[in-house]
Image (cartoon, rainbow, N blue to C red):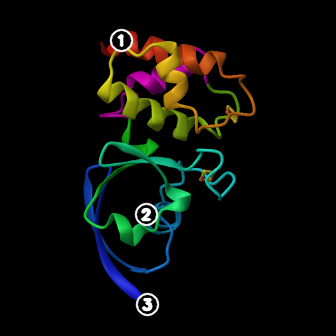
Amino acid sequence: MKRIVSLTVNGREHEDAIDDNMLLIDYLRDVRHLTGTKKGCDGGECGACTVLVDDKPRLSCLTLAATVDGSKMETIEGQAKQGSLSALQRSFHENLGTQCGFCTPGMILAAESLLRKNVDPSDEEIREALGGNLCRCTGYVKIIESVRRAAEVVS
Ligand code: FES
Ligand code: FES
C-alpha cells in the first residue's frame, strides 16, 4: 500500500508517495537520489547507512521511511554548507580518516551527532559514538584522530 510522507531532507521539504514497506535507505537513494548514504551489510551490522533523524544517528537500512514521517533528515550531502566542507568532512580529509570512503558518510554523521551534544569528547566517548560503524580500511586510529581534530575546531 502507498502512503504520502512529508520529510525534510537536508533542509528541503518533500512530500512523496511511497510503499509502506520502503526502507529509509531506499527512499534516500532511489527516490531522493542521495547516494552518499551507503548500503553495506543491509542488516544493521556496519553503520554505513547511518543518517541523522532529528539530530540522532539512525540506521537507514533498518528504518521504514513511513515511520519517520514528519522528521528532519540529514545525509552526507547536506553537511557542506555554501560550498564549504563541514569541520568533520575537512578533518577526515586532512587527517587521512578516509581511504576507500565507503564507511565515511556514516562515520561523519555519527560523529556529527556526537559533536552537537558534546564539543569536547574524550577518545573513549568518540569510540563509543562510532562503535556501530565499521571500517575495513583505516584501522580506526585516523578516524578517531579526525573526530578529535574536528572537535578542536568547533569547540
Ligand atoms: S547497511 Fe545498514 S548497518 Fe550496514
Ligand atoms: S575507509 Fe574504506 S571502509 Fe572505511
Say which mark, if any, is on residue 153: 1
Which region of the structure is painted magenta? Answer: 80-97
Considering the image in quadrants, where does the C terminus appear? Answer: top left
Q: Which residue is mark 2?
A: 32
- Pick out the residue farthest to the bottom: 1
**Residue 95 place in picture, x, y as percent:** 57, 14
Q: Nearer the viewer, residue 29 or 25?
A: 25
**Vertical comparison of 71 with 38: above or below:** below
The type of residue carrying mark 1 is Val
Please tell me whether mark 2 or mark 3 is closer to you in this view. Answer: 3
In percent of the image, x 51 and y 14: which residue is there? Answer: 123
Is 123 situated left or right of 140 in this image? left
In percent of the image, x 65 and y 58: which residue is there? Answer: 43
Q: Is residue 83 magenta?
A: yes
**Residue 47 place in picture, x, y as percent:** 58, 44
**Pointer 2 local density, CA inside 10 Å: few below 14, some 14–19, many at least 20:** few
Q: Nearer the viewer, residue 151 or 76?
A: 151
Alpha carbon separation for disc pair 2 and 3: 20 Å
**Vertical comparison of 42 with 56: above or below:** below
